[in-house]
Amino acid sequence: MFRACFVTVLLVSSTALVFAQRPDFSGMWTLDAEASEFIAPAFSGGRGGDDTGRLFITHAANGSVVVGAETNGVKAWSFTPGKELSIPVGRDTTMLAASRWEGDSLVAEGTQGDMTMHEVMFLSADGLTLTIEVTTTTPDGERQNRLIYKLARPVGPCKQWAMPCKDFPQGTP
């Protein structure tokens, strides 16, 4: 009886570990330039442009992580752990990048021509700091950027803003 209970507890525990909650990167993130170490462009292949002061991240229920920069939102990129996806790099070029979980870190790797990228995203224990470590390798050498972002406070309903919004009637009077 003891052995059967032990095996049951072991199976339940290991199943819980397999389905453990992953970190949620969702939010508007503001670059902490003083804590960061980087040379523009911050991301491999110039993703996000020169200004990566804010990132908007959506972490979908299916596990996909969509990242967009404030100044280049049209060229947002996404990672889906366990899949290889095409992400924009440069003006008119894309790169195939595969991503996976390593513990609580999302790791993405890709190659485009003679450029390779390795990116690691992880949250602080309190979930208020996002660190992205970017390594780009080209024939000219290796460049490492470390970007530290702070979670921006939610703006709340527009009726609470300094200049509140107004309700406009819909339809005809």
Image (spheres, helix red, strand yellow):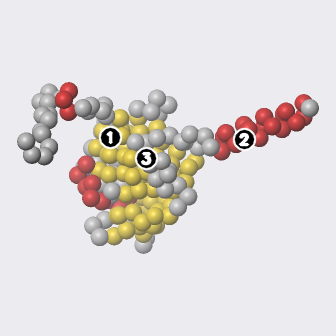
Q: From this viewpoint, which residue is outermost toward the bottom? A: 113
Q: Along the polypeptide, which appears first: circle 2 or circle 3?
A: 2
Q: Which residue is mark 1?
A: 28
How far across and down, in percent of the image, does residue 62 sit? 50, 51
Q: Nearer the viewer, residue 45 or 13?
A: 13
Q: Which quarter of the figure has residue 169?
A: top left
Q: How far is the residue under mark 1 from the one under mark 3?
A: 12 Å
Q: Along the polypeptide, which appears first: circle 2 or circle 1?
A: 2
Please, what secondary structure does the residue beneath circle 1 have? Answer: strand
Name which residue lies at 46% across and 53% down: 64
Q: Which quarter of the figure has residue 3?
A: top right
Q: Along the polypeptide, which appears first: circle 1 or circle 3?
A: 1
Q: Are marks 2 and 1 in contact (CB under 8 Å)?
A: no
| 92 up-or-down from 66: above or below | below
Please, what secondary structure does the residue beneath circle 3 have? Answer: strand
Count the labels in the image.
3
Q: How far is the residue under mark 2 from the one under mark 3?
A: 25 Å
The amino acid pointed to by label 3 is His
Q: Which residue is mark 2?
A: 14
How far across and down, in percent of the image, does residue 108 sit? 49, 56
On the question of residue 47 being in view, the answer is yes
| 109 up-or-down from 171: above or below | below
On the question of residue 118 being in view, the answer is no
Q: From this viewpoint, which residue is outermost toward the front? A: 173
Residue 41's mark?
Answer: none
Q: Which residue is mark 3?
A: 59
Q: Residues within 10 Å of mark 1 (few under 14, many from 20)?
A: many
